[in-house]
Image: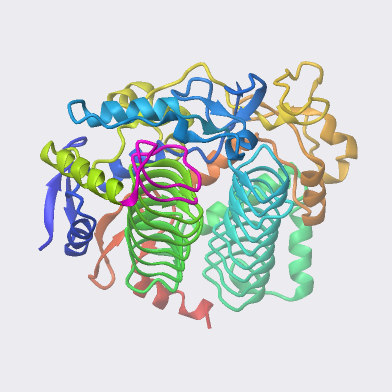
Amino acid sequence: MATEQTCEITQSAFGITEEEIAAYEYFDIPLPTVSPEERCRRQLGFRNSEALFWRNCDQTSEKIFSTFPATSPFPVVDEGYWFSDEFDATSFSQKFDFKRLFVEQLLELWIRVPRPARIVRDSKNVVASHGVRSSEGAYFLFDASGAKNCLYSVGVWDSSECVDCYYVRDCSECYESIHCRSSSKLRWCESSARCHDSWFLSNCEDCSHCLFCTNLKGKEYHIFNKPVSPEAYAEAVQERNLGTLAGAEDARGEWAGFLADQPLPHIVGEEVGSSTGNFLYDCTSVFDSFECSSSSNVVHCHFLHESRDCLDGFGYGPNVSRSIQFVNVSGNASRIINCVECWDEVHDLTYCSYCTQSSNLFCCVGLKGKEYCIFNKQYSKDEYEALKDDITRHLKQRSVWGKFFPANFSGYPYNLSSANVHMPLSKVPAKMLGFTWDDKSEVIKPSQLLGSQVLGSGGSEEESPFDEIPQRLADAKDSAVSKVYLCEMTGRPFRLTKDELALHRRLGVALPTRAFEQRHQERVLSLSPRKMQMKKSEKSGRDYRTAFPDNWRRPVLHSKDWERAVRSLRG
């Protein structure tokens, strides 16, 4: 039977469905006492998918760039050393003491075991990136797989030559595109699938040669959702001078004005059935989840692909199953409980972090290719199962069992984590929630790694004078990549890369006037919050759950009402 709880952090009420109760019982985890939004915040605090920092490798003392700032509570080493046979985290093993606090002992292990500075696997020519595998020619790329020649993007899958994109799949030559799939040559587009050579699309399918269009399906040569001749379309694109800063800025304003009265469905996605959340694609029975695809029986999850039977988790790749309360788990992972950063053929892990190709681990950190370990200490199968049962029973008696890691376990201060990108807080509220804060560490700017600077040197940019970004793309000479520009919003220096300039030329789009960090932040803030609320349709009286808050920048309709409203556009 469904129940209602009061969040111990915000004191707000939140519901727990019968299906959720059954899932918690299956995993033998007590019901949560914290709302879904605050659980999401806690888990995001263990992620960093946007930034790199200078620090020294704790093994070699060489300067490296890392996802962890120098203030991290544990050692950080070059990823080459961490993944080598030379590093074996069983050397940090310790015995569990039933007379001491569990969290205290886990924290001791947690802060002793080194973490890899970043994760880049089976890739080549991938620079200043993290969470990348099976990719080639990437720069400032995060959470990606099968990417080729992609830059300044987060969440790129099986795509090529994409710049300034956020969660795109099977795309090529796309710029400033968000949640697009199986598309090519898109500029300033969002939530569109199987579209080609278009500008400023939103929630379109199977379209090509369209400008300023939303909710279309199977159309070509349209402007503001109206059909035009190919000649009129070409003339309209040319007239707007989208290769100039002024033209691009005017077009963005024109686009925002047009969208202001264009309806959105209460859930954006494709083939979502009865699912709830936002940005779901080909999902079945996925509830209150975000940015998931080809998944089923999932609740309160994010960034999952081809996954099933999961509750309260963040993935960053495919194939997670029968898992609960996890962060950055992927790659054929199953039966994962309360784990952070465990991937590649892992199963039956509990309270683990940075473990790979392992199984049957309990309270372990940094293990590779191991099984039957507790607190990084090796046991026989029978010893492992007996001791694990004893510790679990011990934790249940003290009402500790099943709780996620405390916020201070994270290697990321709140202001330098993904939590602050998606759910911003100021210093005092963040510290009141148990997170740490870091006013000293400075995020690496891409401009520090370009031009005459040596990768990894940590040098300054004073040798290059500040310049103004070319007002017209046509005026940008090859030497533009050697200049240093100032972000018009933050004043931060930034540079262009050769590949970036080349793609802008091919797509005919103006050069950026803002630094990568600012551009990424603006993309994230354009998304709906990761918080659900109940609404009633004014047209049909239907009750529904949506992530779009009141007074969203566009009218939001129940999906059935939306289908009727846009039927003429999708014939």
Question: In the image, what residue occupies the spot 60% across and 79% down?
Answer: 218
Please determine whether, in this image, residue 193 is positioned above or below residue 11: below
Q: Let me know if residue 380 is in the magenta part.
A: yes
Seen in the picture, residue 166 relative to 397 is either above or below; the reply is below
Q: Nearer the viewer, residue 11 or 188?
A: 11
Determine which quarter of the picture holds residue 58: top right
**Residue located 54% across and 41% down the image:** 522
Instruction: Measuring from the top left, give residue 32's x and y in whole percent.
Output: 20, 47
**Which residue is more in the foreground, 145 or 193?**
145
Q: Is residue 103 left or right of residue 111?
A: left
Residue furthest to the bottom: 571
Relative horizontal placement of residue 533, taking residue 137 as reference (left or right)? left
| Residue 547 is at least partly visible in this image | no
Residue 528 in the image, given as x and y percentages of width and height: 41, 51
Which quarter of the rendered picture does the N terminus lie within? bottom left
**Which quadrant would residue 52 be assigned to in this image?**
top right
Looking at the rendering, the stretch of residues picked out in magenta corresponds to 357-381
Tell me how many marks there are: 0
Image spot of residue 415 (x, y percent): 45, 28
Q: Percent position (x, y) of residue 556? A: 38, 61
Q: How is the image coloured?
A: rainbow
Q: Is residue 121 magenta?
A: no
Check the image and report above or below for 296 versus 351.
below
